[in-house]
Image (tube, helix red, strand yellow):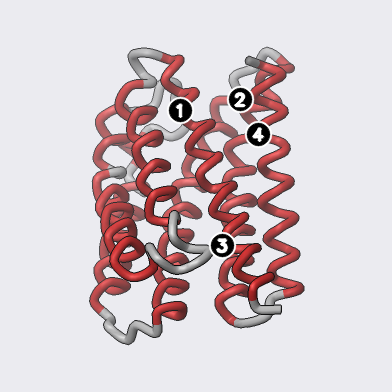
Amino acid sequence: MKYGESTFDILYLIFAIVFGCILIIKHKDKTALLFGIMALVLGLGDAFHLIPRVISYFIGDELVFWKGLGKLITSITMTIFYLLLEMARRQIKGDDSIWPFVTMAILAAIRLGLCAFPQNEWFVLPSSYLWGIYRNIPFVFIGGLTVFLWFRDLRSTKPFRIVYLLVALSFAFYLVTVLGASYVPMLGMMMLPKTVCYIVMIVNFVQYNRSLE
């Protein structure tokens, strides 16, 4: 697991960051630029969490502080990612309604506020299980609203027809980890298929930009 997971994590980070930069540099419209920013936010945010995890495998040190800081930063960047994804949907669909973004922004503010509480015990191993659930409640609502909107508006639009499914699967895998990994550590491996969902999503972003040529 040490070598396999570490290799996967590093390749994913390189993929997300490189293609994020490519989309930013070679974007054909504002939506493709937004996708590039999203990929970069995803890759750089996850780097704070995954790099200490990889290093800890090889030095025999849990790096509790750095892993905790990485989880906190990733919680923030993932929240931002979904706000940007909603902005992208609005641009693609030409949707002028404000309520979805406002709703997500409120949920995001609640989530980030919950992340700021010391009860999360970010820098303690193990961190608080209950607060791990509390801070993810508004995040799950963000995910549910995202799935609904992308299914309603873009399920028949190439290359976005499966984005709603990728979001739904990523949240399903994530929730298995959040709810079960403290009791069954192997469930933490569900973060790997979750990451695959984001890789496919980035591929969709690249396909969109290429379709504009």
**For residue 148, side relative to residue 192 (left or right):** left
Q: Which of marks 3 and 4 precedes in the sequence?
A: 4
Name the residue that disc number 1 marks: 190
Identify the mark nearer the N-term, 4 or 2. Answer: 4
Are the residues tagged 3 and 1 within 8 Å (C-beta)? no
The CA span between labels 1 and 4 is 13 Å
Q: Which residue is mark 3?
A: 38
Which amino acid does the dot numbered 1 rest on? Answer: Met
In x, y percent, where is residue 88? 47, 72
Residue type at numbered disc 2: Leu
Disc 3 crowd, CA 10 A, few/some/many (<14, 14-19, 20+): many
Q: In the rendered structure, which disc, 1 or 4, sits on the residue that comes first in sequence?
A: 4
Q: Nearer the viewer, mark 3 or mark 2?
A: 3
Instruction: Say which of 23 and 114 sits in front.
Output: 23
* Place of residue 42 in the rendered image (x, y in percent of width and height, measured from the top left): 57, 53
Q: Residue at x 28, y 81 (%)?
A: 98
Q: Residues within 10 Å of mark 2 (few under 14, many from 20)?
A: some
In primary-sequence order, the first of circles 2 and 1 is: 2
Crowd around label 4: few <14 · some 14–19 · many ≥20 (10 Å): many
Q: Which residue is mark 4?
A: 9
Q: Is the C-beta separation of discs 3 and 2 under 8 Å?
A: no
For residue 63, the mark is: 2
Helix, strand or loop status at disc 1: helix
Looking at this view, is 185 or 64 the one in front? 185
- Kindly report the distance in space between the C-alpha atoms of the residues bearing marks 4 and 2: 17 Å
From the top left corner, tell me how far across and down residue 198 is, in percent: 53, 48
Amino acid at the residue labelled 3:
Met
